[in-house]
Image (tube, rainbow, N blue to C red):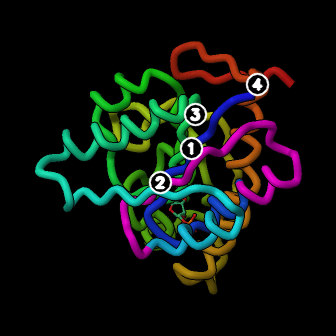
Amino acid sequence: MRNLAVFISGRGSNLEAILKRWKEGYLNCNVPFVLSNKANAGGLIIAKNFGVKTYIIDKKDYESKEKFEEAILKIVKEHNIDLIVLAGFMLILSKEFIKSFGKDIINIHPSLLPAFPGVNSQARALNYGVKFSGCTVHFVTEEVDAGPIILQEIVPCFDEDTEDSLSLRILEREHIILPEAIKLIIEGKIERNGRRVFIKR
Ligand code: GRF
């Protein structure tokens, strides 16, 4: 049984998708806590509704990013976490954090990486004029949105799309592939060779 922690900063719809799948028994793991770097993150209420412990660790309460990350690491180590899932966590974790944790960290991103890394990906995809976009679950490395890709889903972009309509279409797929990627990791079905990730089905 593995210990999973989810980090959020906002709404928490991906967190909700994970916790739903977990409660259904699709994910065979413990979820000792959800951590938010924002006290007003909607996802904190979702976590509480599922009976999951929450921590708020806000960077502005610490004198440096290093101290902030030390506080997070302390909680992570206390709970013996095996996998950290970034689900709308809007801060970049340092390479020191990634190294000290030393286990898997994954992220969900609302574009077909390596296209449109960073923020406002859906609007940038629309403005670029792509005909397809989607979402990506990838391992977190020190370079932003650039780690090895675990799963991707494609969605079409239509002439009448707005940022909101495209974001919503992508989000529906995020809610499927993020729990799926977690399941694959928990069940030891992922193999990595450099940038390439293979799934043993
Ligand atoms: C999602 O679009 C995710 O891809 C991105 O941040 C957003 C988080 O949404 N990383 P939510 O908080 O899970 O609803």
* Quadrant assignment, res 75: top left
Check disc 1 and report its element: helix, strand or loop: strand
Confirm or deny contact between disc 3 and disc 1 (CB under 8 A): yes
Instruction: Determine the CA span between mark 2 and mark 4.
Output: 29 Å
Confirm or deny contact between disc 2 and disc 4 (CB under 8 A): no
Q: Amino acid at mark 2?
A: Leu
User: Mark on residue 35?
Assistant: 2
> Which circle's residue, 2 or 3, is located before the other in the chain?
2
Instruction: Determine the CA span between mark 1 and mark 2.
Output: 7 Å
State which region is magenta.
19-40
Tell which of 31 and 195 is nearer to you.
Answer: 31
Check disc 3 and report its element: helix, strand or loop: strand
User: Mark 1 — residue?
Assistant: 5
> Which circle's residue, 2 or 4, is located before the other in the chain?
2
Residue 155 screen position, x and y as percent: 70, 62
Confirm or deny contact between disc 1 and disc 2 (CB under 8 A): yes
